[in-house]
Amino acid sequence: MTGREWGLMGVLAILWGVSFFFSKVALAELPPFTLVLGRFGIAALALLLAARLGGHRMPRSPRVWCGFFALDEPVAATAIAGMALVFAGLLAIDGRVLRARRADVAPPRSRSKAA
């Protein structure tokens, strides 16, 4: 990699890390939904501005928008299903780890004899 590429990689790393820091600070003051709405709104405006500066325009045809939403639904559903599988796997692993930790820490149970 060239020096310029390393510099761009460093800028990317700084921007990425700063976003996590500011997210933590902002979550202390704002509800999560407001924070997500603000971040997506700012990103949408930035992308719209970049598209306009690049000479692109938003489509005006309802046919194009219908195609976009028709494609978006299966993609979103697939992404949500994938995330659900990942979270289910993580929960299964976490449950096993927690049970193992409890077994290590918990005092032995005494067996009571029924009279």
Image: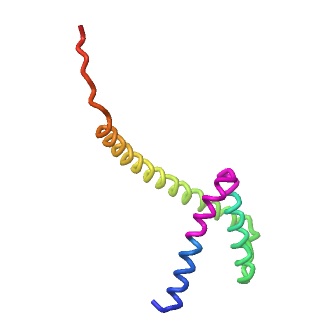
> Residue 60 magenta-drawn?
no
**Residue 103 placement: quadrant:** top left
Residue farthest top in this picture? 115
Query: Which secondary structure type mostly characterizes the magenta part of the structure?
Result: helix
> Residue 20 magenta-drawn?
yes
Residue farthest right in this picture? 60
Foreground of the two, 47 or 68: 47
Q: How is the image coloured?
A: rainbow
On screen, 57 above or below 109?
A: below
The answer to whether residue 83 is left or right of residue 37 is: left
Segment colored magenta: 17-35
Residue shown at the point (24%, 11%) measured from the top left:
114
Residue shown at the point (41%, 46%) measured from the top left:
91
Which x, y percent locates residue 60?
76, 70
The answer to whether residue 3 is left or right of residue 109 is: right
Number of numbered labels in the structure image: 0
- Quadrant where the image shows the C terminus: top left
Which x, y percent locates residue 17?
55, 69
Residue shown at the point (69%, 73%) measured from the top left:
47
On screen, 51 above or below 71?
A: below
- Quadrant where the image shows the N terminus: bottom left
Foreground of the two, 47 or 13: 13
Foreground of the two, 18 or 81: 18
Residue shown at the point (50%, 56%) measured from the top left:
78
Which x, y percent locates residue 81?
49, 52
